[in-house]
Amino acid sequence: MNSYTPKIYRAHEKGICVNAPASKSITNRAFLLAALSSKTVRLTGGALGEDTRAFAECLQALGIRIDEEENAFTVYGCGGDIPVKNAALNVRSAGTAARFLTVALAFCGGDYTLDSSEQMRKRPMKELLDLLRGAGVSVTCLREQDCFPFRLRSQGFQADYVTVNTDKSSQFASALLLSAGVRKKPLTVALTGARTQGSYLGITLNMLKAFHIPFQKKITRSPCSPRKIRLRNTRSSRTFRARVIFTLYPFCAAKRLRLRACGKTACREICSSSNC
C-alpha cells in the first residue's frame, strides 16, 4: 500500500495552487488515440492510477512504445497497424481498457486472448461482443458466455453502419468512436437511448477534436413517453429522445496534447497545441 505524507501550510500563506491530475477517463482515451495515430504524441498532466497503468501495459504488450517521465508520457503511434498481432492481454479491473482495447483490436485485426480480474469477469460484455460479431469479428468465450476471458480473431471491422444503445453503456459507443479512424473508409455510428449526449461521450468527442479526427454529427429527435409529467398553466411541453448519428473518417493526430484536470466542462479539460 502506498503511503503519503501531507504537507501542512500555515494559515497566513497565500497563493497555494494544487493541480490534480486529469481523470483516467480522459487519460485512457488519450492513450488509445495516441497509440493508433501515425505520429509521436506527448501527453502531459495525465494520471497514472491502476486502471491507466493496466491500459498502458496492454498497449506496451502490443508493441506500442510508451516513454514515461514525471507527469508526462510520450506515445509512439503505430498508425493503426498494431505491431504485435498475436498476444495475451489482461485488462485487470479497468473498464475503459476492457471496452476500448477490445474494439481497437477488432478494428486493427489480429489474434488475441483477453482476460481480466475476477471482478471484471462478472461484468457482461454481451452487447459489445455481439456488435463485433455482427461486423465479422470472431469472438470465442473461454469461460462464461459473453464475459472475460475470450479469444478475439479479426481481419478488420467489416460493418459500415452500426447502432449502439447508450442505455446499456456509453463506453461501447465511445470505443467505436475512438477506433473508427483507423479504417480506410468512413464508419457511421447511430446512438440511441437516453444518454446519447452524456458527459462521457462529450469527453470522447472533445478528444476526437483534439486529435484532429474528422467526424460529422447529426441529431434527430422523436417524441417518447415521459416518466413524469408536471402540469403548468398555459404551457405545454414534449419530451424527446435524441438519436445521434456520427460518421467517422480516417484521422491524423495532434503532436502534443496537454491534459488538464480542472474545468466546468470536459472541453476545458482537453487542450491541443498543434495542427495536423
Image (tube, rainbow, N blue to C red):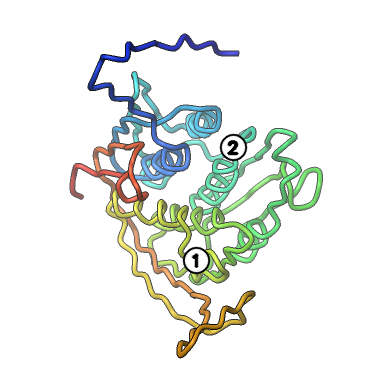
Q: Separation of disc 2 and disc 1 at Cα?
A: 23 Å
Where disc 1 sits, the SS reads: loop
Front residue of 265/57: it is 265
Q: Please, is residue 99 above or below residue 232 in the view? A: above
Mark earlier in primary sequence (2, 1): 2
Name the outermost residue toward the right.
Answer: 144
Residue drawn at the location 47% of the way across and 53% of the way down: 200
Mark drawn on residue 94:
2
Where residue 42 appears, as percent x and y from the top left, is: 29, 32
Amino acid at pointer 1: Thr
Amino acid at pointer 2: Ala
Residue drawn at the location 24% of the way across and 19% of the way down: 14
Where residue 43 appears, as percent x and y from the top left, is: 32, 33
Labelled pair 2, 1 in contact (Cβ < 8 Å): no
Front residue of 213/36: it is 213
Front residue of 53/240: it is 240
Q: Nearer the viewer, mark 2 or mark 1?
A: 1
Where residue 233 appears, as percent x and y from the top left, is: 49, 87
Indicate left or right for 157 with 68 as reference: right
The N terminus - image quarter: top right
Residue drawn at the location 57% of the way across and 66% of the way down: 164
Q: Which residue is mark 1?
A: 196
